Amino acid sequence: MNNKNTADQAFVRETNLSFVLRQIHTQSPISRAQLAVLTGLNKSTVSSLVDDLIERNLVCETGMNSTGAGRPATLLEINCNAGSIIGVELGVDFVSVAVTDFLGNIIWRRKEDADPSEDQKKMINQTLQIVKEAMTVAKKKGPRIFGIGLATPGTVDLKEGVLIFAPNLHWRNVPFRKLFSEQTKLKVFIENDANAAAISEHLFGTARQCRDFLFVFAGVGIGGGLFLNGELYRGKNGYAGEIGHSPITAEPSQTICHCGNRGCWETYANQYSIIQRVQARLEVKRSSIVPKLMAEQKSPLTIPLIKQAADAGDMEARESFIEAGHAMGQGFAGLINIFNPEKIILGGPLSIAGDYLLPTIKDTIARHSLTEIDQQAEVLISPFGPDASLIGAIAIVADDVLSFPSQLLKK
Amino acid sequence: MNNKNTADQAFVRETNLSFVLRQIHTQSPISRAQLAVLTGLNKSTVSSLVDDLIERNLVCETGMNSTGAGRPATLLEINCNAGSIIGVELGVDFVSVAVTDFLGNIIWRRKEDADPSEDQKKMINQTLQIVKEAMTVAKKKGPRIFGIGLATPGTVDLKEGVLIFAPNLHWRNVPFRKLFSEQTKLKVFIENDANAAAISEHLFGTARQCRDFLFVFAGVGIGGGLFLNGELYRGKNGYAGEIGHSPITAEPSQTICHCGNRGCWETYANQYSIIQRVQARLEVKRSSIVPKLMAEQKSPLTIPLIKQAADAGDMEARESFIEAGHAMGQGFAGLINIFNPEKIILGGPLSIAGDYLLPTIKDTIARHSLTEIDQQAEVLISPFGPDASLIGAIAIVADDVLSFPSQLLKK
DNA sequence: ATAATTAGTTTTCCGCTGCAACTTATTAAC
DNA sequence: GTTAATAAGTTGCAGCGGAAAACTAATTAT
């Protein structure tokens, strides 16, 4: 029953290797001497660790840096060609797969429509097919593939690599690790979509040095990835982060949430609520270019389309976003009171409308935060937008390499 | 800039010493052999660690345990006389000081009325006076005093031992560590009252083996101590846990909270709101024994008095608690959605009415939790009741000893 | 009385980091 | 153009801590 709460020499080595590697990841380019100062480790220890990382092909020397007197420093960087990563995002109506290098730069990607409610086996086979294609691309790039990351809605068993329950997909107990590793012989990781997105921000995005931040995934629902005390918080059963079902008092609560309650923040600020807002406004038929755009593109009313209208100056579209932003701001204010986070990052399908949502969100937060204390949190739009979870799937694999570098063989 | 993210041999030793000590703390009595199995450490390593802990007087052998064949085991326990601890709780109108042994058993205590708004210096001197008295009591018990713990409302700088800001006391930047350690030459720790209470539950109370739980401190306001991933979460500036200002939709929001918003959970479920509920009921003058009790005891309307009435079967008192419990349950349901905790523990002045609040709280949670997922959390009343923060002050000192046992000298 | 079983200790070994002395590579000064 | 100063990085050694295996110790079963 040893849950690795104890330590030994191997643990010391792994801890220091990982820490040095992470420092190079965030601070590169950097010299051994700088690393010694930064980590507090002895120069000789840093040299030994760096040699190790170079032998494992994770780090490379990329030049010299002469600053004034003394021997010039050898600069170190992450070797972005250390290996490639395959990421898979499972959505309610699509599968997305990407191949990236070690730094998360996308080399290849594909997105296909899919219907999980139709036939689970079929969708899994469809996914496996794309993954195999991704593997051939990755192998062309280099011999080493670090693994496959899978981001999915719902709860997961990280250790066993099993999807426990995804209400949106109507799936239960899908042993993804078993299924995928049998077919690919690769290491397979699985994580909840919002959690994965949070890790992507920590590793590749806007929360690189950040110990305490929240990732808010806004789409069909509103879910959260909670990154606290420098690590992901999952709760007792992995259900933590259902932030969308906190009530807000913005508008009289007419809508009943699918959770059965009234007033849930999610019902005022999710994808569908914005579409409804626009529809309601169109019915009173004010001047709006939305119907024109719909006709031109033969498209139903979608968030991207509303965003397009807003970009063209359409006031109905803009005000719909502003209304949703108001609800979102109230939700964020509640989170700030509870978590006092350094940052809140908005991602997912809705984040493409960030420019219209953000000012209202910030404004509402300012009005609803506790006045006595100064606890402002930075509110940001995820640089990965709707791909936050896909990049997150990549990130969980990269994070494994950064956490356990000695699992890789020396050459 | 080494924030101790690296490891060395000394760290290994401290980690293992601490882990073994904590195991003995929670699992005692226990043998070296059992510890080896439990921790995954080698038998010889466990022996060496235990010898170390015995030399530091933290652990003692307390007997044998023969189970079937084989050499009987030597049982180990925490030495409760390892040293004593002084705890101080600062309240809005009182100071409470206690002396305990290493296991948190109270040896001596004193509570005095105090008025922080009147004169800060005076109240600090008053506190110091009681602390000095506590020290003489502690010294009589044994030579070693582990330190002084201070629990206070507001935010604190743990590292510097400074009270940053306590709105309720109207205090700012009080350097308690400096003030107290100069006078006592003891190690001084400071912590927010709700956080301290959470630690007390983890160490001495109902959350001993629990990685994820919330402590809800209900009194004048409603504050939370968030224990997540096995450690306290404080947020970016130490303001995390302001859970009382999440809105609920229970009743039409008439009251404006001191935070400036409407609908805050705290306004429906704090001490004052219950007193108001009873008052409102008395005005419609139903049959209630509350006025009689007030006259008999020459007491204003207080929570203990209302509790007394409820115990005597008074329906107005009971229903007031039930109404508040309903609001509290909605607040708890929101927390469960966000945190998926293993437990929620209710403490503070209001917890004396736990018997009346608990059934309604549980009922409301059941009705408001997400139905799709099974995420029930255990709801408990703190065994320390209104003393939760005082015991918390003790706990932060004990926790320091458990975390860094090698700071203590060998005899 | 002997074997079996379990608890705990002793001895040896390996690997880790820290430390100090060293080499290497540059700039600044005369 | 040589020497001193400075900073980067390496080498060798010491000390420490945990793992493993062989040991001793103390009991029960036969």
Image (cartoon, coloured by chain):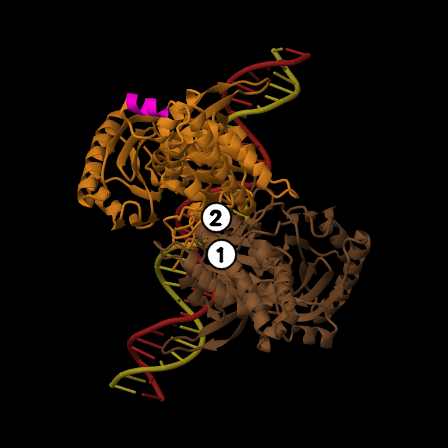
Chain colours: A brown, B orange, C yellow, D red
**Which chain is home to disc 1?**
A
Query: Residue lying furthest front in this view?
Result: B284
Q: Amino acid at mark 2?
A: Pro
Along the horizontal axis of the image, is A408 left or right of A43?
right
Along the horizontal axis of the image, is D14 left or right of B119?
right
**Residue at 41% in and 23% down:** B287
**Residue at 70% in and 66% down:** A143
Q: Amino acid at mark 1?
A: Gln
* Tally of numbered discs: 2
> Where does the image place residue B183, in percent across and percent down from the top left?
19, 41
Q: Which mark is residue B247?
A: 2
> Where does the image place residue A356, in percent across and percent down from the top left?
54, 69
CB atoms of marks 2 and 1 within 8 Å? yes
Kindly indicate whether the residues beneath marks 2 and 1 are on one polypeptide chain: no
Q: Few, some or many C-alpha atoms within 10 Å of disc 2 (few <14, some 14-19, many ≥20)?
A: many
Camera-side residue: B398 or A411? B398
Camera-side residue: B273 or B259? B273
Q: Quadrant of residue B394?
A: top left
Residue that mark 1 sits on: A330
Q: Main secondary structure of the magenta part?
A: helix
